[in-house]
Image (cartoon, rainbow, N blue to C red):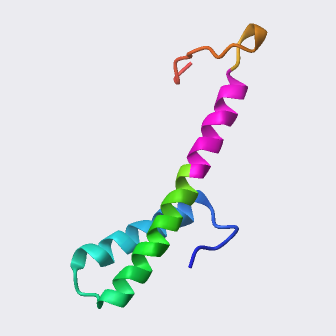
Amino acid sequence: MVKKKQTFEEAMKRLESIVKDLEDGELPLEKALELFSEGIALSRLCQSSLEEAEQRIMVLTAGEGGKNTLKDFNS
């Protein structure tokens, strides 16, 4: 099951493992459904983490007047 304090990297690693197991097609139906459910939860956790990171980046790169400005990542 999904841990409450799982990092993005840990969640992605587990999600990759689940995808591999499901793609192998060797699991009984109940186990496949259990893993699929866990994978959905992990996917949502990762999406939430990415959205939070995007918001933090927008705040950090806000220009004058609070307007977001596009900046070259290498700058």
Q: How many marks overall?
A: 0
Q: Is residue 34 left or right of residue 67?
A: left
Quarter residue 21 falls in: bottom left
Please determine whether, in this image, residue 33 is positioned above or below residue 45: below
Region of the chain picked out in magenta, as a range: 48-61
Q: Give the residue at x 29% y 91%.
A: 28
Residue appearing at x 64%, y 67% in the figure? 6
Residue 34 higher or lower than 10, as above or below: below
Residue in the picture at 38% in, 88% down: 31
Would residue 51 appear left or right of 29 to someone viewing this image?
right
Q: Nearer the viewer, residue 73 or 27?
A: 27
Q: Residue 68: x, y in percent? A: 65, 17
Given the current orientation, which residue lies at the most extreme right position? 65
Q: Reply yes or no: does residue 31 show up in magenta.
A: no
Considering only vertical position in the picture, is 30 above or below 13?
Answer: below
Image quarter (top left, top right, bottom left or bottom right) of the N terminus: bottom right
Looking at the image, which residue is at 66% across and 35% down? 55
In the image, residue 54 lies at what x, y percent? Answer: 60, 36
Please state if 75 lies on the left or on the right of 23 as rendered: right
Does the magenta-highlighted stretch encompass residue 49?
yes
**Quadrant assignment for the C terminus:** top right
| Quarter of the rendering containing residue 8 | bottom right
Asked if residue 32 lies left or right of residue 3, the reply is: left
| Main SS class of the magenta portion in the image | helix
